Image: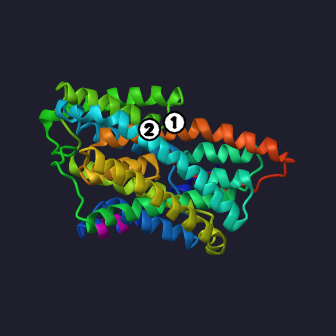
Amino acid sequence: MSAPSVSDRLASLRHLAETLVMAAAGGSALGLLGVPAGWLSGSILAVAGASLAGRPMFIPTLLMRAIFVLIGISLGAVVTPETLHGMATYPVSIAVLLLAMAIISVCGAAYLRLVHRWGNVDAYLAAAPGGMSQVLALGAELGGDLRAIAIVQSIRVVVIAVGLPAGLSLLGLGGHTPSRVTGTLSIGVLDELAILVVASSLVAIVADRIRFPGGLLFGAMLTSAVLHGTGLIHAVMPWWVANTAMVAMGAITGSRFANTSPRLLLNFVGAAFGSFALAVTIAAVFAAILISVLSLHAAEVMIAFAPGSVDAMMLLALALNLDPVYVGAHHLTRIFFVSLTMRLVARRTSRSLKIQGEPAKPLLKRPPFQD
């Protein structure tokens, strides 16, 4: 293949600039109004709306990878020895999470099959509570309808990322501890910041290379957490860096709707919102049971159990001043669980139906973010 021409590169730069301007405008509008996680949700809404209107929203892969690392570094900064004391409650909470995710998968697939007459493979992959990249790869391998699966999964991610913080605010469930993920930039902390960024980036790259789920984010977060939790590093990212990361993450999420016409979106909106409502209801029931049994913060449990993308849910924990260690442990477990079980169930279903290998509808642009 020939290298991109100068005109192609200029077009990509124009699309990137337009995307960032839209994201900044949307994020600033809600963020400055004081809307919970407004920098993130405003950016998502603005870029998703522009994508559906036909504008070429675009975020390059290299920039996305840098954003994931930056978010991980910011998240790890909240970790202290005190935050680790709550890990004793994790095993029970994670066990309840796994049960909830299994029921969501089964019930969601049944809903799509019975109500919307979807095929078994498409129904299971669209109902899977996470693992977007793995879902699409497996769908292509088994001849699934990638457009249908991607739209249902995308609506689930965006609605949760935008609606969950607003719902928590209405219920009066916000962060219970002051945020320590942001600070001020001064010459005295530049050396610590340099060590923090370099170490976190190296571990993130290694985690990504060995295909650790969400490796860039979780690798950077783990390194930052260790450095801050042990007291080796005290410097944290400036506030404007954290807000910029939220806006950029919103742009990544919203750009998922690129090349999707409103008509095509409406064709699947019923299936998307129906399966989404079912998943959220099941997750909420299990979260409520867990909150009533254990002494856990309601907002943290709700975000930990929400079947949204890893990156968006972790960023919500950051924006709402919640414990990212608890939230991250649950979402990492969810992605591992979905990734391992999804392939086994989908392949077994495919063999039982003796799929003839009908060509899948190509996805014009692969959703560029981890879930």
**Bounds of the magenta span?**
26-30
- The quarter of the displayed image where residue 248 is located: bottom left
Residue at point 14%, 40% (across, down) = 186
Q: Which mark is residue 322?
A: none
- The quarter of the displayed image where residue 250 is located: bottom left
Spatial CA span between label 2 and label 1:
6 Å
Q: Is residue 44 above or below residue 70?
A: below
Amino acid type indicated by mark 1: Phe
Q: Which residue is mark 2?
A: 332
Residue furthest right in the image:
356
Amino acid type indicated by mark 2: Leu
Q: Position of residue 93 (x, y in %)?
A: 36, 40
Q: Quadrant of the N terminus?
A: top right
Q: Secondary structure at mark 2?
A: helix
Q: Which residue is mark 1?
A: 336
Q: Secondary structure at mark 1?
A: helix
- The quarter of the displayed image where residue 122 is located: bottom right
Tally of numbered discs: 2
Dots 2 and 1: beta carbons under 8 Å? Answer: yes
Question: Along the line of sight, which residue is nearer the eye, 23 or 16?
Answer: 23
Residue 20 belongs to the span the image colors magenta: no
Q: Position of residue 316 (x, y in %)?
A: 33, 53
- Quick check: can you spot residue 202? yes
Residue at point 35%, 39% (across, down) = 72
